[in-house]
Amino acid sequence: MLELVTELEADETAVRDAISRLTELSLIRRSWENDDLLLPISPEVAVGALLAGQEERLLQQQQELERSRSSMARLVSEYTTVGHVPGENGVQRLEGIDAIRTRIEELVCRSSVEIISFNAGSYQAEALEAGRATDRAALDRGVIMRGLYLESIRNHPPTRDHVRWLTDNGTEIRTTPVLPLTLLIFDRETALLPVDPEQRGAGALVVTGTGILTALLALFEQFWDSGTPFGGRPQDEDGELASADQELLRLLAKGLTDEAAGRQLGVSQRTVRRRIAELTDRLGAGSRFQAGVLAGRRGWL
């Protein structure tokens, strides 16, 4: 040892560490005749020993991986049995925001073909940000994503910015003046929709029944075909009435109050009244009743 320290002009601790490491790698061994003598091992023998050690460690890692995979499969099976009891006729009810968001994350992660959605409202920036990781992972897997949003999101910066992020990452987005409800459909096999469209916290329904899914898919495609691509003009180039204003007139003609019409369109009651005033001025009407008559004559209703 002292001879090596002197010859190498190195620190004794460093030399001891180096000897220990070379011994672990089976590159040197002590002489059988002289315990103080260190001998190099044949490269052929050393490489064989190294590969054997690596193969053994790799085998241990593979066995540990299989044990972990089996444990995870049992955990998923138990979780599915306890936490996701199937409902009657392919419909199951979820209670609470946590249960709903957890199921959405699971369904997004399992999707392999397509995710389509009605987004009937605006959302908080934190909630939108929380879903981006799973959305990006789905898009990276090649999952097709199509989403319909209310035209009113153009006036809600957090939702508008999120929609822009979605389109930048490959999602197809269209807007429409009104949507009947919030809806998610995964791989055309499972749908998730609210128990009460007016109260998001009231719970959600998970639907797997073929008949209901067929109707929901047809409803989506109907709205999708009439939607405006995000970033396009909701108003025609020739100055005709914008689709949002036309929908507002239709809702009012049905007898909805300003507040109810605003909920359908995803805008405030104040915005509804402002748009009605603008339409009244545009028609040259002196009252709402006269505006309705003139709108009918123009073919807006």
Image (cartoon, grey):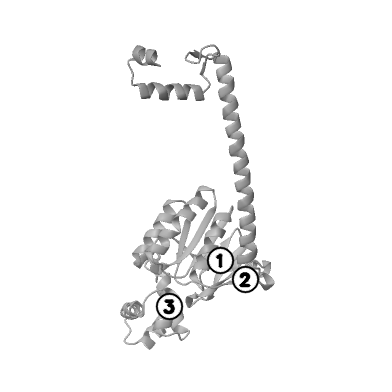
Is the N terminus in the top left, top right, bottom left or bottom right quadrant? top left
Which residue carries the number 1 mark? 220
On the image, the x and y values in percent for residue 121 come to 43, 70
Image side of residue 172 versus residue 86, left or right:
left
Which residue carries the number 2 mark? 92
On the image, the x and y values in percent for residue 162 come to 40, 59
Which amino acid lies under the numbered mark 1 shown in the image of this protein? Phe
Closer to the eye: label 3 or 2: 2
Q: What separation in Å lies between label 2 and label 1 (alpha carbons)?
A: 21 Å
Which amino acid lies under the numbered mark 2 shown in the image of this protein? Gln
Q: Residue drawn 50% across and 48% down?
A: 140
Badges 3 and 2: C-beta atoms under 8 Å apart? no
Local secondary structure at mark 1: helix
Local secondary structure at mark 3: helix
Q: Which mark is residue 263?
A: 3
Tell which of 119 and 100 is nearer to you.
100
Tell which of 102 and 64 is nearer to you.
64
Local secondary structure at mark 2: strand
Q: Residue drawn 40% across and 78% down?
A: 262
Badges 2 and 1: C-beta atoms under 8 Å apart? no
Could one spot residue 157 in this view of the protein? yes
On the image, the x and y values in percent for residue 160 come to 38, 62
Q: Residue drawn 50% across and 65% down?
A: 101
Residue 128 vs 24, above or below: the answer is below
Q: What separation in Å lies between label 3 and label 1 (alpha carbons)?
A: 20 Å
Tell which of 79 and 5 is nearer to you.
5
